[in-house]
Image (cartoon, rainbow, N blue to C red):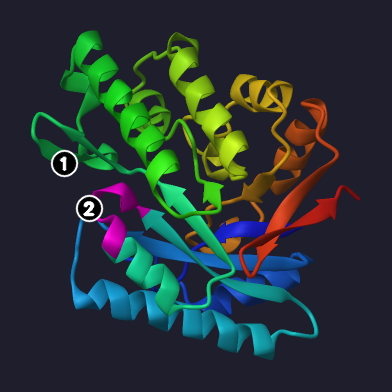
Amino acid sequence: MFNSHVHSQFSSDCSASGEEMCRAAAAKGMCGIAFTDHCALDSYITENSYRNALAAAKAAKELAKKYSDSLAVTAGIEMGEAVRKPGYAERIIKAADFDIVLMSVHNVFINNSSAHLARLDFSAMTDSEIKKITTAYFRDLKDSVIHTDFDVCAHLTLPLRYITGVYGRKLDIENFSAETEAVLKLLINRGKALEINTSDLCRAFHDFMPCESVVRRYRELGGELVTIGTDAHVPENIDSGFEDGVKLLKKCGFEAYYRYESRKPVKVLFG
């Protein structure tokens, strides 16, 4: 099990240390983890974000040396909304020797302002408003795939975590099949990977991001590069849903998943 999406104290929404995450992964018998702490360029553009990214990478490399006999530890980053500040994102990526760069969208630009999906009250919205926000998410995601430097597209279909999982509003992702397929084709054409994010299997949403139909379509289109990430923010979730992710990939016709070293995909065959 190589978990390609793990957070630590360098993410604002995580208090667990990298040491705690490594101990948990080793105890679970995982072969490795990638630290991919948040760098949300839509939320803050300061020298602190630059220094934080470098500090996170340095800490991951120190842990890699410490756990070299029992756990492969790699240094990464989850770059959010990089399309808003591509020059700044490029500066950060070049400054650290990252093994993996995740691309994600948590904030959507709508009504001339930025809105964080986790802070929106979808219960008070009309179906039309929810559709508008979801459409904006896919627009921003597509722009990110086209214009930013990254290796893996993280938690595709993230809005469902909040719209359906938190607020119980129904949203059929099939109504956005054209948008999802456009993103999948771009990922394949650019040689970028699709993440199978398992973090919501233990939450109210209780599904993968993206869901099985999207993963299956990615495979039908010729997609091969996939990673598995639990998006762990606490040690006890270090392997949460990982084996379910493997089962999903096998079900959809994949023969392996990938990890990244020096920003190059490395195949991991199913055991």
Left or right relative to 271: residue 150:
left
| 38 sits to left or right of 156 | left
Question: Label 2 sits on what residue type?
Answer: Asp
Q: Quadrant of the N terminus?
A: bottom right
- Residue 34 in the image: state x and y as whole percent: 60, 66
Q: Position of residue 127 (x, y in %)?
A: 25, 10
On whether residue 14 falls in the magenta region, the answer is no
Q: Does residue 15 appear anywhere in the picture?
A: no
- Name the image quarter holding residue 247: top right
Q: Quickly name the residue at label 1.
A: 114
Q: Which mark is residue 42?
A: 2
Circle 1/circle 2 CB separation < 8 Å: yes
Picture mark count:
2
Range covered by the magenta-colored residues: 80-87
Residue under the image location 50 percent in, 84 percent down: 59
What residue lies at 40% left-to-right and 50% top-to-bottom? Answer: 148
Q: Residue furthest right?
A: 271
N-terminal-most mark, 1 or 2: 2
* Secondary element at tag 1: strand
Amino acid type, mark 1:
Ser
Residue 190 located left or right of residue 253: left
SS at mark 2 in the image: loop
- The quarter of the picture where residue 5 lies is bottom right
* Res. 139 mark: none
Residue closer to the observer: 168 or 10? 10
- Residue at (80% x, 85% y) in the render: 69
In depth, the one of 141 and 21 nearer the eye is: 141
